[in-house]
Amino acid sequence: MTLSMLNGEPRVITVGAELLGEALDHQAVPRRAVDWRPPLPGASTALAAVLADPRRARANEVAVGRLTSARPRLVGVRPASEALGLEKGTFFHAGPPIDWERASGPMRGALIGAMLFEGLATTPEEAEARLASGDGITLDPCHHHRTVGPMAGVVSPSMWMLEVADAEHGGTAYCSLNEGLGKVLRYGAYGPEVVDRLRWMGEVLGPVLAAALERTGPVDLRNLIAQALQMGDELHNRNRAATSLLLREIAPAVVEAAPDRAAEVLRFVNGNDHFFLNAGMAAAKVSADAARNVPGSSLVVAMARNGTEFGIQVSGLGDRWFTGPAGVPDGLYLGGYGPDDANPDIGDSTITETTGLGGFAMAASPAIVRFVGGDVSDAVAATTSMYEITLAEHPAYQIPGLGFRGTPVGIDVTLVARTGLLPVVNTGIAGRVAGTGQVGAGLVSPPAEAFTAALEALAAG
């Protein structure tokens, strides 16, 4: 055997350092390249235990099947006090649990603005003092209440919520109405223009949309998202097509339901390319929730950030959070802002990536690179790499540029650990100082320790 190896043509497999492979290419030596990466540090023992779990394969099949078969429909718009039983003094927020002491600038700014909006304080200083003391104030994650919120994600009782129901599995999820871009509450701004806009949304926008939906009946969001992907959206940072499709769906009913206010409502929606984002987030939330609580499943059912920590939840581990420090996105900045002005990653909008959209669907949205940075090849590479850490391809959400291949969906903790690949997230960037608003947009990766901690919990049973 040794002699035959020495006398025959070498068969070369290259792993890792591409420099060695390139040297062989220059010498015209045939080789087979293997794209291998080491597992996440410290994950080997837990990974072996989880892979040996006889429940895992079937549990993941069930969980991802529920996620991809969900049929989210927009069924109503209601005040949070009614839809969620939210009482004055209680605020929901994005990401894992956090208190005022650890809250970032944009989270604090959004809470101050919500206090002013609810009439619980008359000045920012009074609001901040009361929040710091905790007097009559309760903070709780949106995810604990079938809800998601973009950026700071603050929800207060008087805000109106989009209500999305899953026609397949029966779940319901909520998200607030989108305020637009610039100085808005979700980015931590709380000036008079922010509070005045929220009041108009509560007095006009919410009631008119509610009346319109009573006329149209449920709006099929799964179908709308599938169309928008084929029109150049990725449904996280680009929602222009989806917003246009939704506007076309409801515009006649808006005019019929409120002829005196229709023009201002339609003008507001038309001027806000991200209006659909919140409906898409609620659709993603109700889809991911359908996959929860499958014993033995290593499927990620939530990724969320509160501006301080990035957390994940896993189907087989109930409502437990596994966290690590939130990173600062790398991207493009507005005006004179730069990296020093950026807050660490924040928001529940990573529920889109959790369900195969956003960063996982960038190959469907070449124009997104003008917003988050990079070039078209980077967008395609981001999507194709995510097939390595997901359990399925979405049957409805398809990418024309990849031959109508379904988006990668169903992040598996074990695949993340085995490959060392972390989910790709594209996101807006909030200013780190309360009251600043949006300063840019870019790409960010979750902390690896969130996934290794979840893997260890799965291994422990």
Image (cartoon, rainbow, N blue to C red):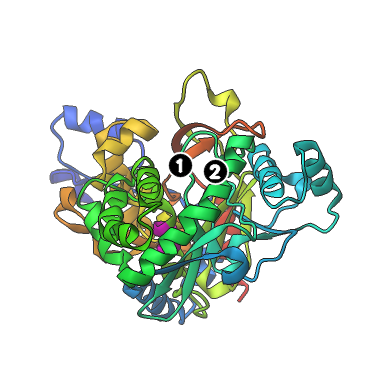
Q: What stretch is highlighted in magenta?
A: 279-283
Q: Is residue 216 above or below residue 276?
A: below
Picture coordinates of residue 341 (x, y %)?
59, 26
Q: Please say whether residue 363 is visible from this viewpoint.
A: yes
Residue drawn at 45 percent across, 62 percent down: 282
Q: Which of marks 1 and 2 is nearer the N terminus?
A: 1
Residue designated by label 1? 180
Magenta residues, dominant SS class: helix
Picture coordinates of residue 88 (x, y %)?
73, 61
Residue drawn at 66 percent across, 48 percent down: 117
Is 209 left or right of 392, judged from the image as shown?
Answer: right
Give the class, few, some or many, for how many residues have Cα within 10 Å of label 1's Cα (few <14, many ≥20).
some
Residue designated by label 2? 197
Residue drawn at 79 percent across, 41 percent down: 128
**Residue 408 lies in quadrant:** bottom left
Q: Which part of the image, by quadrant, shows the N terminus?
A: bottom left
Give the class, few, some or many, for how many residues have Cα within 10 Å of label 2's Cα (few <14, many ≥20).
some
The answer to which of 136 and 106 lies nearer the viewer is 136
Q: Is the residue under label 2 in contact with that under label 1 (CB below 8 Å)?
A: yes
Picture coordinates of residue 283 (x, y %)?
40, 64
The answer to which of 250 and 417 lies nearer the viewer is 250
Magenta stretch encompasses residue 377: no
